[in-house]
């Protein structure tokens, strides 16, 4: 893995600058592992060439960074989807490896339970705020992105009673994803969802390394879609709820409920009001919170390594 190229991962530049001011040096104690989000990951035992290779490369990067710095363990810092990849990396390696190489895992804006926004993306296409773009023209490409399937709402987090997509004849909760994929005209998504994604999201295991989740809240986030004519090519009416503008609050906070009985799992949650999914990487208050957390982790030790992983 190469260290972070700031021209490629420029959206993380303010965060990198903050870490460098803290004393981290690019390519020495600060490393990056950007990922092509068009490719997803599958549960263990299922072929996932790109995703599995990325986990292997990330593991090697962690080991090399630690060894080149006198065996110090690594602080993993992820954003968004990166948190899900890091969690998978940790649980797919033995406790002895985690104890040796991982000091702490800090997840920014992690969509632990997926996002309702993904159902909007699959149904009608999502321009992501880009003007003069026909969402139906990008819908096909977005449906082909494997990571989008991974980010569909997790039934364990959103439950069977919450209607997410409502049409005159039928409503869909997170438990109705197979019917939803068929009814929006994407039946080819059913097989990979059932065989690769469901086993992956069924159990978000605790890695038993210290974890801090930092997230924005209080930002208007898509909560329910109403298709008045039942036509998914039309733009729906939208009801909003709490979250970071992309990920719903229930998903951001999911680990609190999923790991509540994990006695040996340290989990800290930091909520920052008014900070969005992406602005957490550049907002001054958010950056101060992130830097403060890293400083606290290192307060009783030498400067640890930080592996910056972009999701």
Image: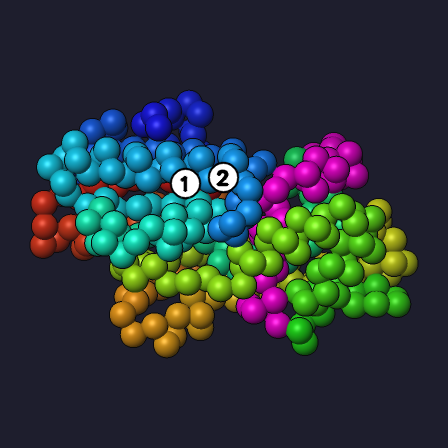
Q: Which residues are magenta?
A: 131-159
How many marks on residues? 2
- Please give the name of the residue rendered at 34% of the width and 25% of the height, measured from the top-left corner: 2
- Name the side, left or right, on which 78 lies relative to 111: left
Residue designated by label 2: 51
Asked which colour scheme the image uses, the reply is: rainbow
Q: Is residue 278 magenta?
A: no
Residue 123, position as x, y percentages in the image: 76, 50
- Please give the name of the residue rendered at 20% of the width and 29% of the height, measured from the top-left corner: 28
Tell me the number on the disc at residue 280. none
Residue designated by label 1: 55
Mark 1 crowd level (few <14, some 14–19, many ≥20, 10 Å Cα): some
Q: Quadrant of the N terminus?
A: top left
Residue 206, position as x, y percentages in the image: 37, 63
- Please give the name of the residue rendered at 72% of the width and 52% of the height, measured from the top-left corner: 190
- Please give the name of the residue rendered at 12% of the width and 53% of the height, measured from the top-left corner: 299
Tags 2 and 1 in contact by the CB under 8 Å rule?
Answer: yes
- Name the side, left or right, on which 46 lies relative to 31: right
Residue 303, position as x, y percentages in the image: 14, 43
Nearer to the camera, 84 or 269: 84
Q: Quadrant of residue 260?
A: bottom left
Nearer to the camera, 136 or 274: 136
Q: Main secondary structure of the magenta part?
A: helix
The answer to whether residue 251 is above or below residue 55 is below
- Name the side, left or right, on which 17 lies relative to 173: left
């Amino acid at each position: 893995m190469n260290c972070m190229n700031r021209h490629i991962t420029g959206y993380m530049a303010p965060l990198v600058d903050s870490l460098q001011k803290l004393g981290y040096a690019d390519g020495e104690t600060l490393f990056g592992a950007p990922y092509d989000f068009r490719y997803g990951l599958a549960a263990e035992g299922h072929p996932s060439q790109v995703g599995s290779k990325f986990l292997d490369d990330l593991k090697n990067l962690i080991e090399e960074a630690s060894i080149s710095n006198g065996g110090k363990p690594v602080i993993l810092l992820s954003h968004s989807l990166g948190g899900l990849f890091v969690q998978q990396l940790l649980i797919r390696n033995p406790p002895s490896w985690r104890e040796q190489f991982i000091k702490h895992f800090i997840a920014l804006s992690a969509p632990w339970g997926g996002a309702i926004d993904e159902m909007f993306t699959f149904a009608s296409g999502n321009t992501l705020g880009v003007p003069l773009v026909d969402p139906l023209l990008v819908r096909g490409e977005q449906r082909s992105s494997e990571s989008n399937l991974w980010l569909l709402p997790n039934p364990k987090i959103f439950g069977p009673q919450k209607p997410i997509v409502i049409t005159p004849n039928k409503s869909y909760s997170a438990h109705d994803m197979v019917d939803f994929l068929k009814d929006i005209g994407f039946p080819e998504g059913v097989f990979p969802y059932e065989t690769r994604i469901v086993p992956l999201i069924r159990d978000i295991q605790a890695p038993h390394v210290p974890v801090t989740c930092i997230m924005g809240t209080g930002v208007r986030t898509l909560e329910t879609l109403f298709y008045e004519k039942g036509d998914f090519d039309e733009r729906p009416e939208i009801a909003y709820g709490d979250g970071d503008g992309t990920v719903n609050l229930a998903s951001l906070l999911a680990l609190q409920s999923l790991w509540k009985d994990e006695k040996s799992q340290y989990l800290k949650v930091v909520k920052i009001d008014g900070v969005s999914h992406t602005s957490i990487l550049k907002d001054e208050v958010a950056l101060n919170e992130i830097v403060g957390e890293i400083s606290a982790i290192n307060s009783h030790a030498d400067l640890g390594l930080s592996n910056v992983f972009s999701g």
